[in-house]
Image: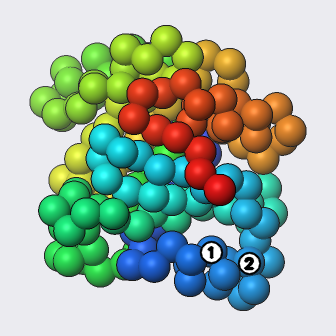
Amino acid sequence: MAKIKGINHLGFAVKNLGEAIRSAEENLGGELMIKFESTKQKYKGALVQLGESIISLIESTDENSFMAKFIESRGEGIQHIGLEVDNLEEFVKHLESKGIRVDKGDMQNENFPEALVGTRTGYGVVLQLTQWKAGPMDVSPEGRERIKQKYREVPGLRLIE
């Protein structure tokens, strides 16, 4: 059976991205890695390195987006957990065999396949399952380049300054 290899990041819903980045840097000693935007899902965000870990800070850019609705109903906080799996297709099949619904919308991406498991199964948060072809999302120089590559290649995503 396919297995989870580890947590590659934690995603936080925030009301103000700039304030969240400043707080992560000043209070937690974080280092801004990138800023990004999803025109498709209507949010902007940033990845911040904390030691050997990564957090994703995400702010809605539209009051009707999924992120705005999440913050309205649950407030700021952990919205998703990024999990690296050793075989995404097998892991998704396993979950589905257990009756778990999986959003496979991003599984078709050649280099950055991902799938999402909803909050009912994810203990109140979304589980983002990843198996990037070029290697994992991490803080190494290669990992940082893979992250930038994702935001350059995946439709609807882009790096921002």
Where 68 sits versus 104, above or below? below
Q: Residue at x 69, y 24 (%)?
A: 135
Q: Is residue 131 in sight in this rendering?
A: no
* Residue 95, quarter of the rendered image: top left
- Residue 21's tag is 1
Where 91 sits versus 5, above or below? above
- Residue 95's tag is none
Where 7 sits versus 72, above or below? above
Q: Residue at x 22, y 57 (%)?
A: 66
Q: Which quadrant holds the N terminus?
A: top left
- The amino acid type of the residue labelled 2 equals Glu
Front residue (pair 3, 10): 10
- Residue that mark 2 sits on: 25
Helix, strand or loop under label 1: helix
Where 157 sits versus 67, above or below? above
Q: Residue at x 59, y 31 (%)?
A: 152
Left or right relative to 21: residue 37:
left
* Residue 55, quarter of the rendered image: bottom right
How many numbered marks appear? 2
Q: Which quadrant holds the C terminus?
A: bottom right
Can you give x and y, in whole percent of width and height, for residue 45 in the image? 51, 59
Q: How many residues crowd mark 1 within 10 Å: few (<14), some (14–19), many (20+)? A: many
Helix, strand or loop under label 2: helix
